[in-house]
Image: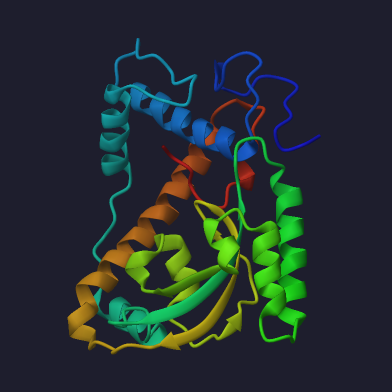
């Protein structure tokens, strides 16, 4: 059965997550299921009217969105990170907040689009990653692969993205590429909201390293966000454990998927 195949409707406590006959991949279903778990919990806590309509088309009402925000603010209090925790993070990630850091990049993008078989897409991307890491031809094979496989317009220029900074990239892409000294084809696929990337770092400019005091607030924000994500994941697991969830595998979610 493919990633988009469904035999029975996906539901949370009897509430359907999609229209009859609608086919969705598991990631989309997990996103809707997590949102529906929170919407129902907001109703149970008296934060949302009982007649609020569920988001069968993937969208929820403005009232539900506000109620979920109130619910999470109440249920997930996150303490301020200590100075020691911030300093440990700074010491462990010395390049994470480099100023002026740039990288010259090429990539091959395997876009994740509705209906795509994500498992097969990943296998194809991983096979190409191994091939390009083993290539010793001065980059010619990478350019050919980009022209053949990449779903990015840069494929016609050999995958060239030019010199980029963190601010030029999606945050999840930047986290994988910047803050290290790696040169060449990265040993892992880079996941972003656009899909799976085989990335080559052609050159780097490391930039300047700020002092701890200069980046303490940014580090504290990073640690708070990490703590919030972990707390949300645990909270969703508790809600899922107390609910009747059909047709969607919430255990497979690597991160909380909430609209």
> How is colour applied across the structure in the image?
rainbow
Place of residue 193 in the rendered image (x, y in percent of width and height, measured from the top left): 49, 51
66 on left or right of 140 = left
In the image shown, does 36 or 83 lie closer to the viewer?
A: 36
| Quarter placement of the N terminus | top right
Report the residue at 50% width, 75% height from top.
105
Report the residue at 45% width, 74% height from top.
162
Q: Which residue lies furthest to the top in this view?
A: 51
In the image shown, does 27 or 239 lie closer to the viewer?
A: 27
Q: Residue furthest right?
A: 1
Q: In the rendered image, is residue 214 in sight?
A: yes
Place of residue 152 in the rendered image (x, y in percent of width and height, measured from the top left): 55, 56
In the image shown, does 210 or 71 lie closer to the viewer?
A: 210
| Quarter placement of the C terminus | top left
Image height of 207 relative to 44, above or below: below
Place of residue 256 in the rendered image (x, y in percent of width and height, measured from the top left): 48, 46
Place of residue 121 in the rendered image (x, y in percent of width and height, measured from the top left): 71, 51
Report the residue at 41% width, 54% height from top.
229
Quadrant of residue 240 within the rendered picture: top right
């Amino acid at each position: 059965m493919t990633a988009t195949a469904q035999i029975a409707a996906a539901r949370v406590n009897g509430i359907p997550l999609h229209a009859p006959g609608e086919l969705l991949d598991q990631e989309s279903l997990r996103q809707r299921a997590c949102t529906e778990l929170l919407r129902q919990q907001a109703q149970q806590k008296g934060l949302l009217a009982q007649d609020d309509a569920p988001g069968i088309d993937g969208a929820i009402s403005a009232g539900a969105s506000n109620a979920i925000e109130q619910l999470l603010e109440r249920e997930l209090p996150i303490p301020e990170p200590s100075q020691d925790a911030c300093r440990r993070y700074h010491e462990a990630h010395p390049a994470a907040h480099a100023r002026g850091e740039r990288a010259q990049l090429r990539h091959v993008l395997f876009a994740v689009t509705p209906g795509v078989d994500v498992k097969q897409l990943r296998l194809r991307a991983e096979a190409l990653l191994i091939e390009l890491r083993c290539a010793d031809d001065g980059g010619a094979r990478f350019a050919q692969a980009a022209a053949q496989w990449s779903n990015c317009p840069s494929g016609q220029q050999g995958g060239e993205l030019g010199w980029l900074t963190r601010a030029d990239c999606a945050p999840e892409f930047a986290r994988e590429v910047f803050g290290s000294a790696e040169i060449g084809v990265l040993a892992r696929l880079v996941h972003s909201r656009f899909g799976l990337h085989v990335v080559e770092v052609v050159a780097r400019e490391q930039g300047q390293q700020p002092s701890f005091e200069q980046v303490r607030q940014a580090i504290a924000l990073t640690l708070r966000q990490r703590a919030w994500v972990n707390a949300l994941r645990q909270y969703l697991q508790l809600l899922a454990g107390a609910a009747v969830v059909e047709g969607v595998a919430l255990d497979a979610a690597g991160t909380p998927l909430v609209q």
